[in-house]
Image (cartoon, grey):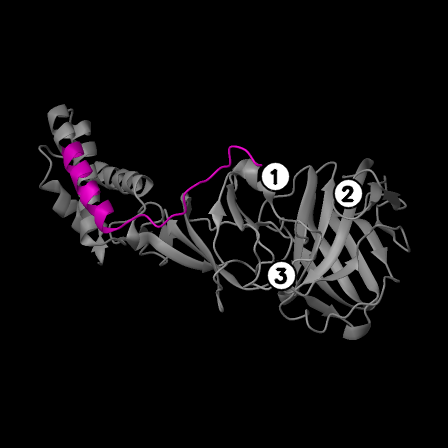
Amino acid sequence: MNTTRTILKTRFAFGVSGLVSDANQSTIINEAVKDVVNDINLASLKRRTALSPAMFDEIYQYTFPSDAKTSGLIDVVPQINRGKFDDWRLTTFDEFDRLKEDQRLDQYGDPIKLGRNTWLGENLLAIDTRDAINKLLVSRPVDDDVVTIDGMNTLGSWAAVGDAGTPTLDSANYVKGSASIRFDIGAGGTTTAGIYNSAVSTFDVTDYKTEGSCFVWVYLSNATSITNFILRVGSSSSAYYSMTATTTNEGATFVTGWNLLRFDFSGKSTTGTPDDDACVYVSLYMTKAAGKVSQTGFRFDNLIMALGVYYDVLYYSKYGWLLNADSSWAEQSAADADILNMEYDEIKLVEYKYRELAEGSLRNFTAVEQNRQLYENQKAIYVQKNPDEALMLETTYYNT
């Protein structure tokens, strides 16, 4: 229904016992919509969006849609060839972190085949709401072609970039394997710091350079004054692909501690003419403020390349308004020409909630209770007709 805020103002005014100013009407309509959307997962606000850029094996953190309700996750589905084992259990962050599947052996020590239709382990989902950004956590084996460019378990030929001091091997603080490559930032005052290697084991980017991604873990002892991270991969220091990461893999800002970076080949720039099937050159460094000097304890670990599998995320949105100004979705309206994306029975819920709030502003508390009851009655009818499809949160009391 193309129901504008102007239409809602005219319609809702008849149900209120007193006069509400135009400005207050706009405010109360916005509050009523938000209250209803927060209270009920509305069928009209179901959305489907691609998991960006894809789902990768042993990569657990992804961007959660910015308009999704944290209680509104419905499903995560492959874009093609869904199998009967593509189902999920939604759990808490803590339980996900403890139970996420990162091994590929069964109880007898035999390898588990990772085909989408044969995996018999548990597929887990969680929503991480820490650090002011919602992240989708996913644990499910993926049929992915992963290439380890360098596990960073040995020092090899890694050398310094920019302000970085001489790299060293750190076998005490790492993410995967047995070590990481550590470097300190000296007092040079340039705008880069990191590591490079012109003699890693030969790797082939032919199948990855269009839609693939590279991942690497970076440990930041101090996360301030960092603009981005740059990864160069190629056949030499004069023939390479360059990619930039301005956030972590899941779209969060860099923080002190371990951060997973993702570099997408789709956004690459090219220098020279790389020999795609004979790549031996890697440069990995931060762009920083010149004043970021004399700091210790930075690390990189486990540089890999992967293609991923394309999945979609199904969810209930908290954005009910289509803004007239730019045709974007929003949580609240900004102008009378904005359209509320709801069906008639859903708008009826908003109307009763509006009446409840408007009567409260007029101090007519008897009418408040009457309209609250009308809202609850309408809600019961609506929920019966439109069962909630969101995944229920499940936790395990104990494991045997």
- Residue 327 seen from this side: yes
Q: Quadrant of the N terminus?
A: bottom left
Mark 2 vs mark 3: in front = 3
**Amino acid type, residue under disc 2 in the picture:** Tyr
Q: Nearer the viewer, mark 1 or mark 2?
A: 1
Q: Seen in the image, is 252 located left or right of residue 319? A: right
Q: Position of residue 296 (x, y in %)?
A: 82, 36
- Horizontal side, residue 192 vs residue 35: left or right: right
Please report the residue visible at 78 percent of the width from the left and 74 percent of the height from the top.
Answer: 277
Indicate the amino acid at tag 3.
Leu
Q: Looking at the image, is mark 3 or mark 1 earlier in the sequence? A: 1
What residue did someone put label 3 on? 114
Upstream in sequence: badge 1 or badge 2: 1
State yes or no: discs 2 and 3 in contact (Cβ < 8 Å): no
Give the distance between the C-alpha atoms of the residues marked 2 and 3, in whole angstroms.
26 Å
Disc marking residue 186 = none
| Magenta-tinted stretch | 371-400
Q: Position of residue 368 (x, y in %)?
A: 16, 29
Task: Pinpoint residue 343: horizontal percent, then vertical percent.
Answer: 22, 54
Residue occupying the point 60% across, 42% down: 99
Specify which label sits upstream in the sequence, 2 or 3: 3
Q: Residues within 10 Å of mark 3 (few under 14, many from 20)?
A: some
Please tell me how many numbered marks the rendered image carries.
3
Location of mark 1 (residue): 98
Question: Within 10 Å of the Cα at label 1, are there few (<14), some (14-19), or many (20+) other Cα atoms?
Answer: few
Q: Judge by depth and name the residue closer to the eye, 373 or 334.
A: 373
Disc 1 marks a residue whose amino acid type is Arg
**Depicted 198 relative to depicted 225: above or below:** below
Residue 298 position by quadrant:
top right
Q: Is residue 138 above or below residue 373?
A: below
Q: Secondary structure at mark 1?
A: helix
